[in-house]
């Protein structure tokens, strides 16, 4: 089993920045590929970014490329999402997810474990 706990969400003005964290436990973190997803009210859960086990491979949704950066610290068992130039349309609950496979993916069914989410609200 893997436990994932997100933090770092909050209220920010458009153009501002936030850094989300996801603390993992229960399994060797460096053996997990990781991802971030967002879910806005009334919408499906959508892919944001993913990172491979070592942190060397990353993949982003087009909507966040150049604004968000996914990273991980395997020594601290923590996943990050640095979000810059935030827009009101980025408002959503953000979830981190873990996969026991060695591939990164934008598909939610690829991931085996999910956190409870952290709310990000961007005001205009």
Image: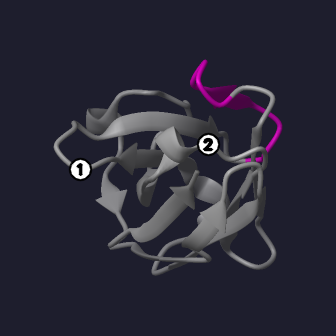
Q: Residues within 10 Å of mark 2 (few under 14, many from 20)?
A: some
Q: Quadrant of residue 59?
A: top right
Query: Is residue 62 in the magenta section?
Result: yes
Which residue sits at x=72%, y=32%?
Answer: 58
Kindly state the secondary structure of the residue where label 2 is placed. loop
Residue 65 at x, y percent in the picture: 72, 26
Report crowding for label 1: few under 14, some 14 to 19, many 20 or more residues within 10 A (C-alpha). Answer: few
Whether tag 1 and tag 2 are in contact, CB under 8 A, the answer is: no
Task: Give the distance between the C-alpha atoms of the residues marked 1 and 2, in whole angstroms.
Answer: 16 Å
67 in the magenta segment: no
| Residue bearing mark 2 | 87
Q: Which residue is mark 1?
A: 41
Q: What stretch of residues is rendered in magenta? A: 54-64
Q: Residue at x 77, y 57 (%)?
A: 16
At horizontal 68% and vertical 47% (from top left) the residue drawn is 86
Assign the magenta stretch its main secondary structure: loop
On screen, residue 53 versus residue 35, left or right, reads: right
Q: Nearer the viewer, residue 55 or 42?
A: 42
User: How far across and down, in percent of the image, does residue 90 sit?
Assistant: 52, 44
In the rendered image, the vertical position of residue 75 relative to residue 29, given as above or below: below
- Image quarter hosting the N terminus: bottom left
- Outermost residue, front direction? 124
Q: Between residue 119 and residue 113, name the one nearer to us.
A: 119
Figure check: 70 above or below 2: above
* Residue 89 x/y as whole percent: 48, 39
């Amino acid at each position: 089993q893997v436990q994932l706990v997100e933090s770092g969400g909050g209220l920010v003005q458009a153009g501002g920045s936030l850094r989300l964290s996801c603390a993992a436990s229960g399994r060797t973190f460096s053996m997990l590929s990781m991802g971030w997803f967002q879910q806005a009210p009334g919408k499906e859960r959508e892919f944001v970014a993913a990172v491979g086990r070592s942190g060397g491979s990353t993949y982003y949704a087009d909507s966040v490329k150049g604004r968000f950066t996914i990273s991980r610290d395997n020594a601290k068992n923590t996943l990050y999402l640095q979000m810059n130039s935030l827009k009101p349309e980025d408002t959503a609950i953000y979830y981190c997810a873990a996969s026991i496979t060695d591939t990164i993916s934008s598909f939610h069914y690829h991931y085996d474990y999910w956190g409870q989410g952290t709310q990000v609200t961007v005001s205009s």
